[in-house]
Amino acid sequence: MKGFLRDNYFERNDSTPKIILIYLALIVMTLIAVYPILNILAAALRPDNQMFSTSLAIIPKDASWANFKAAFTQIQLTRWIYNSAFISLLTTVVTLFFSTTAGYAFSRYRFLGRSGGMIVLLVTQMFPATMILLPLNILLTNLDLSDKLWTLVIPYVSTVVPFSIWLLKGYFDTIPVSIEESAYVDGCSTFRTFYTIVVPLSKPALAVASIFAFMGAWSEYIVARVLIHNESLYTLPLGLVTLQGQYNTQWGVYSAAALITVIPVMIIFVVLSKYLVSGLTLGSVKG
């Protein structure tokens, strides 16, 4: 029993009561984190006449998929998902392009303003994105770029690229330069060495940067609320807010739609989970 509890995550001198307490604390914290999601699932499965039931059952009596069906038939959920997916994927691709190239330049080359540039990138992370909303809205309106879906990529990329550059620059620093020098000796150009050797070796860091970029764009509300006014261009956060009526809210449909919006994020975490832990550690490159 003690060996089962100890596993590989505890020190050899840790006592069994201490290990049990740690497990209990982890279980309690997991339940606290999971309970809201289970509560939303229960609300999504409840019929309208049981919506305000005080039952704690996860699967309510007379549970049905009617609210999930209504989420696709009574509201423009498919359109909102498409808009959010388009913006999130485009933001992720653009972010990775700029952050990988810039991060590699800061890591490998010595040029005037290199240290100052990294400091400037760090300083930009100290200010909330809402500070630039007014000037950004005025600028985009004057350029006739307001109320266009792809316009959201501009503020989204500008806020996540500095962090991604710092992340990738630090990871590139851990990759031995000798690997690239060997490629140069074999006749590879700088461009080919970067995209065929350095980038594949940086998958863990790229996975972390991708998750931050995608999730930031997928769940962002305030900037989209200011820049987007056409209902056909609404993203998921904007669309979900429209379900909250002044006098009445369809909580079943709202809960079902909210759960559906979580699925893409969960899929991304599952697909990239093997890279997340290694993305936060050094020495991931074998010599």
Image (cartoon, rainbow, N blue to C red):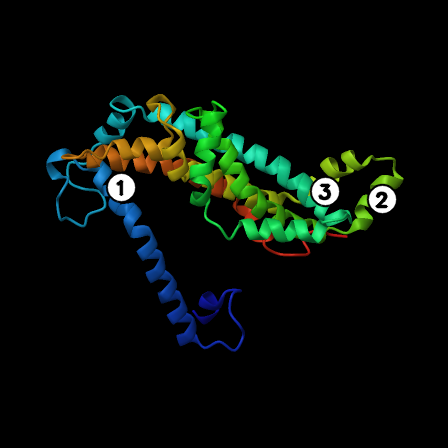
In the rendered structure, the answer to whether residue 67 lies left or right of residue 272 reads left
Task: Give the residue type at disc 2.
Answer: Ser
The quarter holding residue 250 reads: top left
In the rendered structure, the answer to whether residue 15 lies left or right of residue 47 reads right
Q: How dense is the environment of label 3, judged by Cα within 10 Å: few (below 14), some, or many (20 and up)?
A: some
Task: Give the residue type at disc 1.
Answer: Leu
Label placed on residue 41: 1
The N terminus - image quarter: bottom left
The quarter holding residue 222 reads: top left
Vertical arrangement, residue 222 with respect to residue 2, above or below: above
The image shows residue 79 at horizontal and vertical percentages of 37, 23
The image shows residue 259 at horizontal and vertical percentages of 32, 38
- For disc 2, the marked residue is 182
The image shows residue 75 at horizontal and vertical percentages of 27, 24
- Label 3–label 2 contact, CB within 8 A: no
Q: How dense is the environment of label 2, judged by Cα within 10 Å: few (below 14), some, or many (20 and up)?
A: few
Task: Give the residue type at disc 3.
Answer: Val
Vertical arrangement, residue 11 with respect to residue 271, above or below: below
Label placed on residue 187: none
- Measured in 3D between alpha carbons, the distance from the residue under mark 1 to the one under mark 3, in whole angstroms, is 43 Å
